Amino acid sequence: MTGTGLPMTVPAPGLPARIRIHEVGARDGLQNEKSVVPTEVKAEFVRRLAVAGLSTIEATSFVHPKWVPQLADAEQLFPLLGDIADVGDVALPVLVPNERGMDRALALGARRIAVFGSATETFAARNLNRTVDESLAMFEPVVARAKAEAVHVRGYLSMCFGDPWEGAVPVAQVVRVARALMDLGCDELSLGDTIGVATPGHVVALLTALNDSGIPTGAIGVHFHDTYGQALSNTLAALQQGVTTVDASAGGLGGCPYARSATGNLATEDLVWMLDGLGVETGVDLGALTATSVWMAEQLGRPSPSRTVRALSHKE
Ligand code: HMG
Ligand code: MG
């Protein structure tokens, strides 16, 4: 490693003291890999992420195996993660689109699930084979069952800032579907910038509109893909608005197989570098996390796109 491996800490005003990172590398990252990663490697990845201090690690998806073959081993993977509990108080949410997915997730003891809606009709059709309203109807019994079983529900909302087929997405359209997800009973909402086109003013405008519609900022997470290099700026803008849940992907893995213009998520290392510098606590050990992404990059056979991973693992 070069330098000290850590930035100098210089706090800035108006930021939370601590945030929670919702790590999505094992799900959003690996769902988009051309090759299918062996189940044991996925389990080792999740275990290393937990050891590095990540406390919420999205593990896999209980979707149709033909739609996302990369995660078709959810039944084999989830039981391998039992020992993660020994690492600490780690939550392992999983994606569930419908009742069939919920049956599968509950049968394996999942305690946190995420449904995933779309702000646009085109992406709802491509990703869920439904209209926006049909997908909400599909989620309704899933969320009701989760509530009955005290399972925590995250509601993802994709294409909040732009859509590759429909272009600009009006804020009011996003607010309508966000409200509908919260009205179903979601505990948390994650705002997806699926194709990475958001800019900070847009983030502030959407958070303000969601607040005005009665959704508290404390219930909102941000999920930025880094296609245009805006993810960190957008995250800082969201933190300044009071957001304390940030989605990120170790090594910057990621994308969406049903939106080809989606690239990797905000890299967790890039996020932790900024937050360490700002003195915002994350509980993450940057060195251990970087070593995990270097190891994962070796498994995948190509270097991590994360600037921080590359800088910290650069050998003189
Ligand atoms: P469909 O073809 O409309 O399914 O797909 P269906 O309800 O008509 O059922 C057809 C058959 O599939 C039935 O079997 C079902 O049992 C079976 P048959 O009776 O014909 O033998 N089936 C299932 N099998 C296993 N597990 C299931 C399941 N559901 C149905 N869960 C469906 C609808 C929702 C299933 C499909 O569209 C799907 O799986 N989509 C998932 C797409 C996906 O995972 N995309 C990536 C995640 S979203 C994302 O990455 C964005 C995010 O990161 C945020 C952001 O960046 O914006 C979250
Ligand atoms: Mg995503």
Image (cartoon, helix red, strand yellow):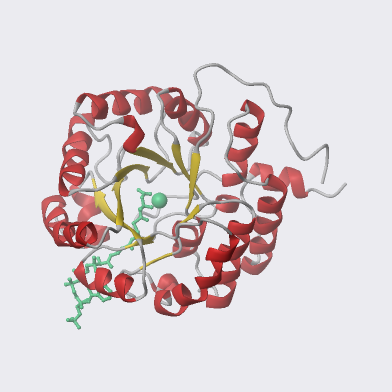
The image quadrant in which ligand 1 is located:
bottom left
Q: Is 55 in front, or is 59?
A: 55
Residue 228: x, y in percent? Answer: 49, 37
User: Residue, x 82% and y 46% (percent of image)?
Assistant: 1
Q: Is 226 in front, or is 295?
A: 295
Splitting the image into 4 quarters, where does residue 11 fall? top right
Residue 244: x, y in percent? Answer: 44, 34
User: Residue, x 63% and y 28% (percent of image)?
Assistant: 279
The single residue placed furthest to the bottom in the displayed view is 76
User: Residue, x 65% and y 42% (percent of image)?
Assistant: 307
Residue 221: x, y in percent? Answer: 38, 40
In this image, 54 relative to 64: left or right? right
Residue 58: x, y in percent? Answer: 45, 58
Determine if residue 217 is in view: yes
The single residue placed furthest to the right in the displayed view is 316
Count of labels shown? 0
In this image, 258 relative to 210: left or right? right
Splitting the image into 4 quarters, where does residue 128 fall? bottom left
Above or below, comparing residue 297 to residue 62 in the picture: above
Determine if residue 81 is in view: no
